[in-house]
Amino acid sequence: MIGNFTYYTPTKLCFGKDCIKDLPGVIGRYGRNVLLTYGGGSIKKMGLYDRVKELLKDFNIVELSGIEPNPKYDPSVITGARLCKENNIDVILSVGGGSVLDCSKAISACAKYDGEGWDLISSKVKAKEALPVVDIITLAATGSEYDAGCVISNTAINDKRGYMDDHLYPVASFLDPEYTFSVNKWQTACGTADAINHVLEQFFADPHSTFNDGVMISALRSLMTNVKIALETPDDYAARSELMYVCSWGCNGILSNGAGYSGWPMHSIEHALSAYFDITHGAGLAIITPRWMREILSDKTIERFVTLGVELFGFDKALPDTDMAEKVIEEFYRFFESIGIPMHLGELGVKAESIEEMADHILENDSTNEPWMYAPLDKNALIRILSASM
Amino acid sequence: MIGNFTYYTPTKLCFGKDCIKDLPGVIGRYGRNVLLTYGGGSIKKMGLYDRVKELLKDFNIVELSGIEPNPKYDPSVITGARLCKENNIDVILSVGGGSVLDCSKAISACAKYDGEGWDLISSKVKAKEALPVVDIITLAATGSEYDAGCVISNTAINDKRGYMDDHLYPVASFLDPEYTFSVNKWQTACGTADAINHVLEQFFADPHSTFNDGVMISALRSLMTNVKIALETPDDYAARSELMYVCSWGCNGILSNGAGYSGWPMHSIEHALSAYFDITHGAGLAIITPRWMREILSDKTIERFVTLGVELFGFDKALPDTDMAEKVIEEFYRFFESIGIPMHLGELGVKAESIEEMADHILENDSTNEPWMYAPLDKNALIRILSASM
C-alpha cells in the first residue's frame, strides 16, 4: 500500500570518476560570480581545492572557508550571506561534507532575504527565493546532496534547527567516490551508521509497502556490506561508489514515499546528545539504535523486526517472532561494534547525570511523544533508552 | 559498483486518493490558457473529464481529443502544436495513459518550434524550449509520467521514433490509483508486463550493483504480486497503488543508475512486431521475454539468472546454475500465462512468413547487434527469438 505523498527532487546528480570535469558548464549556467565554501584543509590536502580553482579559472571566486561541523548561524551563515550580497554572487559552490553543504544551503536563502536570516532558518518566515547551490560532496553520510534540508546551530540562543524548503535543493551535486578514499575509518563508520539510521527511521513506520521495504532492505544490505570493504580497503572503488550513492537516498523521502512518517525519534534523541556532549552524530545514532529497538518492540512493531530478520539477515522464518526480534537487535548491535563504534555513550564522554535533563530537552524541542508517531516515547521511555545506552 | 552516470528527474509526483484536487494550484503556476489532451471516452465514463473541467472552471481550456494508441505525428502532434500556437497556450494538461502523455510531450516541444516538428522528434534539431506539461495518468504501465521520453509514429514515412529530451519531463504528474480501478484485465496485465520488461531490460546489464539489484528485484516482486491481486479484485487500492508507483520508476534510469546500458533489445524486437501487426506492446514483450532469455543464456549472463532465481523466486542456492536459469525462464513464462497473456505470437495474428523481414527491419532501425551491448543479437538470433515466440 502506497499512501498519499508528493515527491520532488529536482537536483541533478553527476556521479562517478572525475565527474567534476563538467563543473564549469554546470556553474556557468547560473553566472560568473561564485561563492566557494569549504571547511578545513582536507580538500586542499587531497588536491580538490586546486582542481576546482583550475576548473573555475574563468570565474570570479569569493571564498568562505572554516565552516565548522554542526555549522553555526553566527559566524558562518551570516558571513556567507553578507559575502553573497557584497559580491553579487550568482551561485554557491559547496566543496566538502554535509556540514559545509548544510551551511551553504542556509546561506543561499539568507543571501536573498533582507531581514534576519534566522527567521528563515527557524521557519518564522518562508523564503521567496534562494541562490542556486552546486556541491561537490566528499563524505558519504548525510544525503544533504540530494535533499532540501539543512541543520544549523545558533549558539547565541542555544538553538539548533532543521530547516527544510524546496528552494534548498542543490541544483547539481557532484559525487566522485574517489574523493572519499581518504575518509578515515572513524568517519567512514560514522557516516555509514548515519545513513543506516536514515533507512531505519523510515523502515519503522506504518503503513508500509512491499516495494519500499525491498528498496530499504537493499539499501541496508549495500551499506552494511560495503562499509566493511571500505574499512578494510579504503580505495576500493566499487564499495565506495555504493556507499556514496546509497547515502544520497537517505533523506529526500524516496525510500519511503507513501509510507507512514515515523517522526525520526532516534534523530531527536541524538540531537540532544550532540547538543550536550558534542559527540559524532553517526556514533550517537549507532549506540542508540539497538536500545531504541528494544524499547519500541511490541505486538504492533514486531512485524517490522521479522521482516528485517528474514529479508535482511536471512534468519529462519520458522523462528518465533520474539526470538527473531531479539536476534535482529543483537545483529545491529554487533554490526556497529564490528565497524569500530564504541557501543556505550559513556565511552564518548556522555554523563549519566545529564540523562533526565536531556530527556526534558528532547520533549521540549522535538516531537517524540506525539500520538501520530509510529512508536511515541514519553520521558520514562527516553530515560530508559539513554540509560541502556550508557 | 556504481559506474558514472547523471540523473535528473525534476517532475513533481503527486500521488494518492483525490490528489487532483491540487490541480488548479499547480496548473495556475504556468498560466490560464490550457490545452487539455485526451484519448477516447474512458475519462468521460469514469467522471474524470467532468471533475477536471470543474476544477479548472476559471481557466481557458482548448481541447484536443481522440489521441490514438501509438500516437501519430499527423494528425495529433501537428494539430496539438497548431492549437497551442493559435491559442497562446501556457500549459498542456494530459489526461489518460502513456499514449496521450507521449503525444502531449511531443506537442509541447513542437509548439515552441517554428520549423517542421518532425525534425525535433527525429532528433535532427535539438529543442530550445517546450511548454510545461502536467498529466493525470490513468494507466499503470509506461512510466511516461516520470521520464523525459515519448514514442511517436509518422505513418506518412513509415517511421516510429523514441524522442528523448530533458525539456520533456512533465512538470507535475498526478497519480490517483482509483483512476486505474476501471482498467480491464487485458490492459492491467499488459501494462504490468510492460513495466516488468522495463525492469528486466535494465537488470540484464553489466556492470551492476547489489543496491540496484535489490531495488529492481523489489520492483519485480511488487509488480508480480500486485497484478494478481488487481486482476482478482480490480478496486483493491493497496495493489493498484503499488502497481502505479512502481510502474512510474520504469524508464527514467533510477532503477539502473550507474549500471551498464543493455540497449533494451526486447523493446527493439517488440517495436517491429507492433509496427507490422499492431499488437499490444506489453503482450508482445511478455511473449518475447522468456525466448529472449533463452537466447542470451551464456556463461557471461548466467549470474543474472541465478540472482533472479535466488532473490526473486527463492529457489535453492544449491541448484546447478543452468538448472536455475531454466527454472527462471520457465517461471516468467508461467507467470505471464497466469495473468492471461497468450504466450504465442500467432495467437495475436503475427505471421511466421514475416519473421525474416522483421529481423531485417530491427537491424536497420534499432541497435541490437552493437558490440557494446550486453548481449548482441544478430539476424539469426533475432529469427530464433521470433520463431520460438510463434
Image (cartoon, coloured by chain):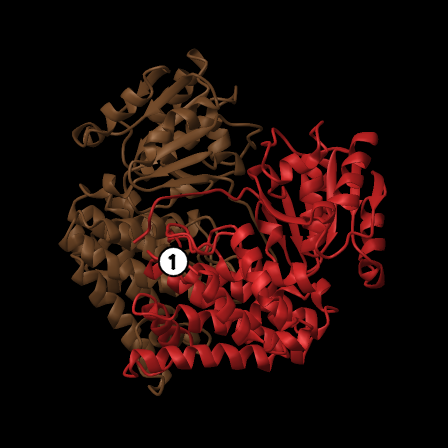
Chain colours: A brown, B red
Judge whether B36 appears above or below B245 on screen.
above
Residue type at numbered disc 1: Tyr
User: Is A345 on the left or on the right of B252, as rendered?
Assistant: left
The residue located at (85%, 43%) in the rendering is B57
Considering depth in this image, is B119 or B165 the residue closer to the camera? Answer: B119
Q: Quarter of the image containing the C terminus of chain B?
A: bottom right
Mark 1 element type: loop
User: Is A207 on the left or on the right of B234, as rendered?
Assistant: left
Q: Position of residue B42 (x, y in %)?
A: 81, 62
The residue located at (49%, 57%) in the rendering is B264
Q: Position of residue A246 (x, y in %)?
A: 35, 53
The residue located at (58%, 56%) in the rendering is B361
Q: Position of residue B95 (x, y in %)?
A: 75, 52
Q: Position of residue A149 (x, y in %)?
A: 44, 41
| Rendering quarter of residue B194 | bottom right
Judge whether B282 appears above or below A342 on screen.
below
State the residue position of label 1: B374
